[in-house]
Image (spheres, rainbow, N blue to C red):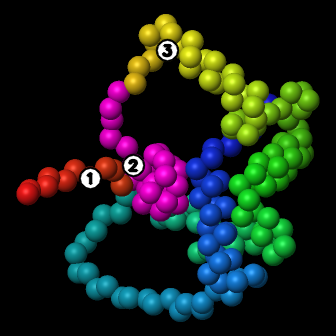
Amino acid sequence: FGFHVTGMPIKACADKIKREIETYGFPPQFPQETEKVEEVKNDEIVIKDKSKGKKSKAMAKTGPGKYQWDIMKSLGLEDEEIKQFADVNHWLQYFPPKTEMDLRAMGLRVDWRRSFITTDANPFYDSFVRWQFVKLKERNKIKFGKRYTIYSPKDGQPCMDHDRSSGEGVGPQEYTLIK
């Protein structure tokens, strides 16, 4: 059974926890914000599309908390446990056994002795993926080219749309410089 773990979202969450500890202390004391309710009066008749959800994808991802610490608290974790999630590798050690436990409880029958995580933290999986790409490249089945991508200056690498904690759906912007 392969536990699919992607690096960028995990790294983003671990970085958020680190920043929250640096900014608000341990355990974090977040500022209390009051919600401002703005009433917008609109006389136009708007036909609502019932097929559209009330929450955006980004809103659904944040869950019950504004801060990553709050999201982890909502999972039933204590402050000392949450602090450990500032280490990216802790995510890889913590969640696969919990997931296996839940899948077993649902009645999934799997040879768990052969389970693995899909990340470069697993050297066997990583070398297998590298081998596949080398073979495909040798057979001219893949090629490298130029394409627009979103770059994360914070992480120093390209990132995909689903990897970002905010700004989903925002594409590359084209600029024209005039000297």
Q: Can residue 99 be seen in the rendering of this structure?
A: no
Distance, label 3 to label 1, CA atoms, is 31 Å
Residue identified by numbered label 1: 173
> Residue at the location (73% across, 40% down)?
121
> Residue at the location (85% across, 43% down)?
100
Q: Is residue 71 left or right of residue 81?
A: left
Q: Residues within 10 Å of mark 1 (few under 14, many from 20)?
A: few
Of 123 and 57, nearer the camera is: 123
Q: Residues within 10 Å of mark 3 (few under 14, many from 20)?
A: few
Of 106 and 48, nearer the camera is: 106
Q: Is residue 45 magenta?
A: no
> Residue at the location (79% across, 55% down)?
90
Nearest-to-viewer mark from 3 and 1: 3
Residue identified by numbered label 2: 150
Q: Residues within 10 Å of mark 2 (few under 14, many from 20)?
A: some
Q: Give percent across and percent down for residue 132.
A: 61, 17
The part of the chain drawn in magenta is: 145-169
Q: Amino acid at mark 1?
A: Gln
Distance, label 2 to label 1, CA atoms, is 9 Å
Does 172 appear above or below 167?
above
Of 65 and 122, nearer the camera is: 122
Q: Helix or strand or loop: what does disc 2 sit on?
A: strand
Of callouts 2 and 1, which one flags the residue occurring earlier in the amino acid sequence?
Answer: 2
Distance, label 3 to label 2, CA atoms, is 25 Å
